[in-house]
Amino acid sequence: MHVKKLLIWLTYTVAVAISTSLAFSIGTTTPYILTTEQKELLRIKVLHESSASNNGELPPQQLNGSHGYQSEPQQTHQCLIIPEHRKKTVDLVFLFEGSESMTEEEFNKNKDFIKNIIDSLKNSSIKFAAVQFSSYPRLVFDFNDYVAGTALDKLQKEPHMRQLTNTHKALTFVLNDLLENPAAGASADATKVLVLITEGTPSDTDRRNIIGQYQDKNIIRLVIAVRSTRLDRFTSIALKPTKDFGFQIENYDGLTGILENIQITIRRMEDESTPIKIKKFGLSVVDGPTRGPPTVKYTDLDQVCAGPTPVNSVCYKMEDDPQQFSSLLSKVFLECRKRTMDFVFLFDGSESMTEEEFNKNKDFIKEIIDLLKNSSIKFAAVQFSSYPRLVFDFNDYVAGTALDKLQKEPHMRKLTNTHKALTFVLNDLLENPAAGASADATKGLVLITDGNPSDTDRRNIIGQYQDKNIIRLVIAVRGPRLDRFTAIASKPTKDFGFQIENYDGLTGILENILIRIFRMKGIKVTGDKNNKTPQSIFSAVVINDTALAVLGSVRSNNWCGLLQRIYAREKNQSKDPGLNPAFYIENSVSVGKRNNIHLHFTGAPQFEQKGQVVLYTHDCENWIPVQRLNGDRMGSYFGAELCSVDIDSDGNTDFLLVGAPMFWNHPKEKREGQIYVYTLTDEIELRRERIVAASAKGRFGTTISSIADLNGDGLRDVAVGAPLEDENRGAVYIYLGDKQSGMRSTFSQKIMGQQILPGLRYFGLSIDGDIDHEVDGLPHIVIGSLDTTVVLRSRPVFNILPQLYIQPEEIRIGKDGCLVNTDERVLTLCFKRVETTESKAGVGSVGLNISYDLDVDPKRQTRRGFFSQTNEASRHTATLEIGHEDTCRRFSIHIPSCVEDTSSPIRITLNFFQVDKDSASGVLDVDSVREAVVEIPFQKQS
């Protein structure tokens, strides 16, 4: 197999099918499931520019079980799987409390939590065991049970012990009888892990120094402290740092909130070469050009902080041998980290406001939290009146219980002791690690009040805030004059103070508040601001038929970003002087060509918090920005994904698709993300054509890929990823291409990751659909997820042409209005099948099953024709297999000798549809005409 050279971009990043459709052109019943020992490498992002000469190959697969494939390093066009190293074996024990202080329902939530983790990690190299403990420990299942497949059944049947909480005794049992016991299935060379779930302080003491033994043996310990249990009492048990391996939740419902964090932490332990602190792993692959790939011997590994999450990236160039990476030219770590931020809402609950106004306060807080839930900000909230009252702290926010507590918070209705409340916020929240505050975090406060302070600043609390560099925003509602809060707000007051007439005005200033909070996070970068050190490669694209690679960098040019063109052994860089250093560009790049003018598109999803897309041309020396498109919604991430489309494959780019995966109209709306479709004119101008959105929450538009023609209409189609849909299982939407608007407004197929392979996470995180299989000649689609890459086959698409004939063609009636000839009429129904795709010989030879319905006079109450002589059946329904030859059926139509209405013809209609389309080898074209009509006129005899 010919292996093309590839430019690969690897990123460490925090990121974190039932099919429903009109046309099922992508088969989901027998996908290729591609896995390797290093599954994290399969979280891919594929960027490319298509051309007529771009034909990929799928590699031969080596079957491993009924669904999995295992092989040497394989390349599927733009999907590279690199078993760079082997995963560790991990032996993990759940030690969960079963004391008398918990209810049966809470005990079962413990078991559900364990089951969910095991289900999500069942395809990993982790072996599990479980122990319940109370006065004594009791084995639920060991590693042998897990391997034998009986573990979950034993967990389900485990009864509640209901006694004391002898934690250290249980830890001794786990170490001796499980983690170091080969008879229990433990592996000598495995990484050892313990997850302790408890709600009570230990009843026993550590007389045998069991914690020291765990430390000496380098056993990783995670502790989940529930309810009243203070996490600091388990400092000695949890691995250091406790903030990474200790979790405090208010009740057992909080287990659901921390499930993903626990899964991520466990996954990191499995990776042999990745430090625990590194979050997740991703891969972007761009195909080399068809003629002389660029020689890009450039590697960069560093951290990017300006995005929604910290990112480490590395850029490699692959030689013909996929196992050989080019030499590493440089490796530079820049001291750059996105700041953690602790942010407190301090809102007035005095008697001067109505209940409705009080609730608008809470709604405002909820909207901000919803918009920033994927940032590095932790939130807390305090209501104040005569005294301050904690609503939720940073621990509650991390545990996922904050908004529920906010919703239930009652109105206090007393005085306005502002300075007393500020003192409480500083001492009990912002500087209190027990409340979840981080010592190195940026500290911020929003004060929302409608009254002047009832108390004075006797303890100089404002001075303390200033000395500690705590950022303060003040929103003065209604009566109070903003100048009275000058001392409280950060300087300049015009930037950190807001005066509104009433609580309805909170909606109006929401956007400004969000901008201020974004800017509080800040970015601190060390290193050469003028780009003398290597910058972070955030996106990459290779232009086909040239030896040119284009890289988007967010780190360079004082965080304004730049584009890099790499041609043969030359590299040049250009920057856009119109960019604001506060917001980075080149999060995404795409390329195109119109009338022989090469074009480049860049996306800056955090530009002014709304996002921006810039269209560039290149004059051989400089990038020339010719158009800027701005997002219209705060936090929508407009420009996070770009996809240029040559709809008819004539070499001219016709459309640009822009993803805004975090777009929403209202927090309560059950949809998230949308795509903007722009037409590219001959004047090199982008004009908005339409907006396409999904009906579910899932980050629709995170990935967009122009894929090969699936239905044979000569137009390229579009695949869109929504990796967070269906509780982070993910989904991919298929849209057929449209000559006028780039893509149709309604999807033709929706592929759910859960149907492809139970346990898939973030299905649709990357997509490529330019692979033509040499066996069947049909396009295939590569879809990346967190653990697995899936190759889905497309199926041949057919158009079915129906025809109806009637003999005799008319009904002769006499002067009395009755039929002259009562002989039966013969109705002939024929179906002709025509393939619209170009599958190779034999692929489209299978039959297509349809269900059809014939109806005589369907819109009349009194029917005038029947399929039986008893004048009872005016409809006929049946199923038929349509092969490559015409398929015909004949029916007798019986007409009563005398009918009342002879002025209008008898009308016979045909409707049909495909049956078993999920499992069929071919599919009916969504545009196929699925009905036909024949009429039998009455002819009066003269």
Image (cartoon, helix red, strand yellow):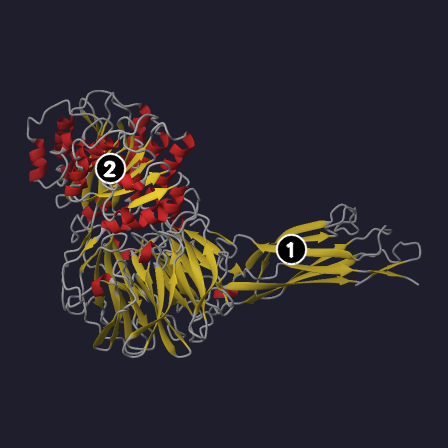
Q: Which residue is mark 2?
A: 394
The span from disc 2 to disc 1 (Cα, nearest Å) is 61 Å
Q: Residues within 10 Å of mark 1 (few under 14, many from 20)?
A: some
Label 2: which secondary element: helix
Amino acid type of the residue that numbered disc 2 sits on in the rendered structure: Phe
* The N terminus - image quarter: bottom left
Is 600 in front, or is 327? 600
Q: Amino acid at mark 1?
A: Asn
Q: Position of residue 443 (x, y in %)?
A: 21, 43
**Between 519 and 728, which is closer to the camera in this rendering?**
519
Pick the quarter of the image with the C terminus.
bottom right
Q: Residues within 10 Å of mark 2 (few under 14, many from 20)?
A: many
Q: Which residue is mark 1?
A: 911
Name the residue rendered at 14%, 61% in the picture: 527
Residue drawn 40% across and 39% down? 502
Disc 2 and disc 1 in contact, CB within 8 angstroms = no
Q: Quadrant of residue 523?
A: bottom left
- Residue 500 higher or lower than 895, as above or below: above
* Lateral position of residue 135 relative to residue 80, left or right: left
Side of 327 where 860 appears, left or right: right
